[in-house]
Structures are given as C-alpha cells and as structure tokens.
Image (spheres, helix red, strand yellow):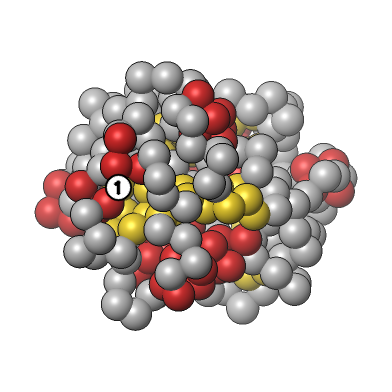
Amino acid sequence: MTYASQKRWLAISALVMLAAFFGSDPARAQIKEGGDLSIELVDPKVLRVCADPHNLPFSNDKGEGFENKLAELFAEKLQKKLDYTYFPQATGFVRMTLGAHRCDVIMGFPQGDDLVQGTNPYYRTAYALVAKKGSGLEEVTTLEDERLKSKHIGIVAGTPPATNMAVNGLMANARPYHLMVDTRLDSSAEAMIADLVSGKIDAGVLWGPMAGFYAKKANPPLHVTPLVKEKTGPRLAFRIGMGVRGADQNWKRLLNRLIQENQPAINKILLDYGVPLLDENDRPIGAETATKLQ
C-alpha cells in the first residue's frame, strides 16, 4: 500500500445536526435551505470519488476496498451514479484529483490535514501492534513494554510510531519497511505480515486499518492491539473523515449529514474489514456497540 496514504491515518468531534430540521430523507435535505446542496459539484447527478487504484484495504479499481463500499453506500443514499478518478496516492494526489475538479470527495482523510477541507470524522483508530497468537506479545499494550526489548519488530520508516520505538530503544533490532512504494508492484504492509508469519520478525507495527485487514487475512489470523497507551512519543490514535475542496461548504454539510445518519452502517463496513475502531476514550468499539451508535 502507499504510505502517503497514511497521511489519512492521521480522524469524532460533534457531528452537524441537520436531521431534526430536514427530516430523515437525504434527498429532501438537498432541496431545502436555499437549494440543492450539490450545487457546487461539476455533475450533481454523479458521486465522483477520488481514489487510489491499488491501495487495499482502502480502495482499488475493482471496488474491493472499504472506501469503495462507503462510496457505494453514499451513492445509494444520494441516489447518484458512482464514478471514480483513480490516481496513485502519493505526492500530487490531491492536486491532480480533487484540486483539479476531476472528482469531488476523498473518502478517507485525517482530521486536521490542511490539504483539503475535512468533513466530520466517521471513525477513529490507531497504529497497532500485530503479533502471533500464543507468542506472549499479544498481551503487550505499549511500546514501552520490556518484553519487546530483544524482539525484531517491523516498522514502516517515517511513520509516527517509529519515533515511539526510537524513544524506547527498539530500533536496533527493528526491521524497516519502505514508506513510499509503487502500489502496483509492492505493499509494505503485506511484506511485513508475510515476514511475521514466516518468523523473520516477532511483531509488526502498522496503521490500524492495515493491521486489522492483513491480520484477519493471515492463516492463522494474527492478534492486533491498538497502541493507545503510549506515554512517550506522539499519540498514535487519529480521527478520519472525508476530504472536499475548501470552497464546497454545502457539499461538506451534506456529507456530514450522511455520516451522522449512516454511522451504524459505516461502522459495520469498517469492522467487516477488520478496522480496530475506538471511541473517544480509546475503548474498542465492537460489532454490537457499533450498530447502536447514533
């Protein structure tokens, strides 16, 4: 996967409440309060999504990623046709897609990144430690744990947890993986998981959505522990929303409304892909809780 896409890692504040005034039908929301909330879009009849064609678990050109599924959900709710502009999520991604008006929304973007205007976040997750079940490391909850001192740990160079590992003296035995790769040919996350399964490394640290997705696919499945108890280095949990152009205020409001109204369905999609969801108190959100959130 492209670790420029991990600028999206970096994502739930109070959601904009329009439902009480407009009712429960998103289509009705578009024709009240001054007209169609899609008026800023190049083609109001089409949900045009900016995406990476080779970046699972987020997206690919076969529609297999969770952001593809979220786009399908939103297109259905908006009663719009779904279309994509695909571009590798590396330097220039925003400029060549959203900025060039070739598409109107990036389905996953970190809260606070000023390259785009962010919607309200729709999930919160963290970098995670991935280990084999029965290894003893599945009980580790922080990179300060003494049980990691002699272990070979995979880390993507240049990502936030690399700082935490350095502070805790774990880099001497670390196995680094490239931050920037051509996703058509390579995946640092897949390579790390393969090395963990084969025993070349004892554990790996990955961005939560990738950790959960690839750990779930491994045979046997691997254990994933979100790193939310770090006391040194940067915080490793982030809120993720969607990205739109800075001028598209009405479009952002409509997306905020859709996020609010469809949060349980959004959570289900994310959990199906193994994304370790967290509430604002760093507690895991399981399937039963996720489907009840409003």
Frontmost residue, 120 versus 142: 142
Does residue 65 sit above or below 38 in this rendering?
below
In the figure, is residue 236 to the left or right of 220?
Answer: right
Frontmost residue, 78 versus 196: 196
Does residue 58 sit above or below 249 in this rendering?
below
Percent across and percent down for residue 118 are 58, 31
Quadrant (top left, top right, bottom left, bottom right) of the C terminus? top left
**Dot 1, crowdedness within 10 Å: few (<14), some or many (≥20)?**
many
In the figure, is residue 15 to the left or right of 245?
Answer: left
In the figure, is residue 76 to the left or right of 39?
Answer: left
Percent across and percent down for residue 108 are 56, 46
Percent across and percent down for residue 2 are 68, 56
Name the residue furthest front.
Answer: 150
Does residue 241 sit above or below 219 in this rendering?
above
Q: Residue at x 34, y 69 (%)?
A: 216
Q: Secondary structure at mark 1?
A: strand
Q: Residue at x 67, y 73 (%)?
A: 61
Quadrant (top left, top right, bottom left, bottom right) of the N terminus? bottom right
Residue 281 appearing in the image:
yes
Label 1 amino acid?
Thr
Residue 77 appearing in the image:
no
Q: Which residue is mark 1?
A: 225
Percent across and percent down for residue 177 are 64, 54
Q: Residue at x 78, y 43 (%)?
A: 94
Frontmost residue, 92 versus 282: 282
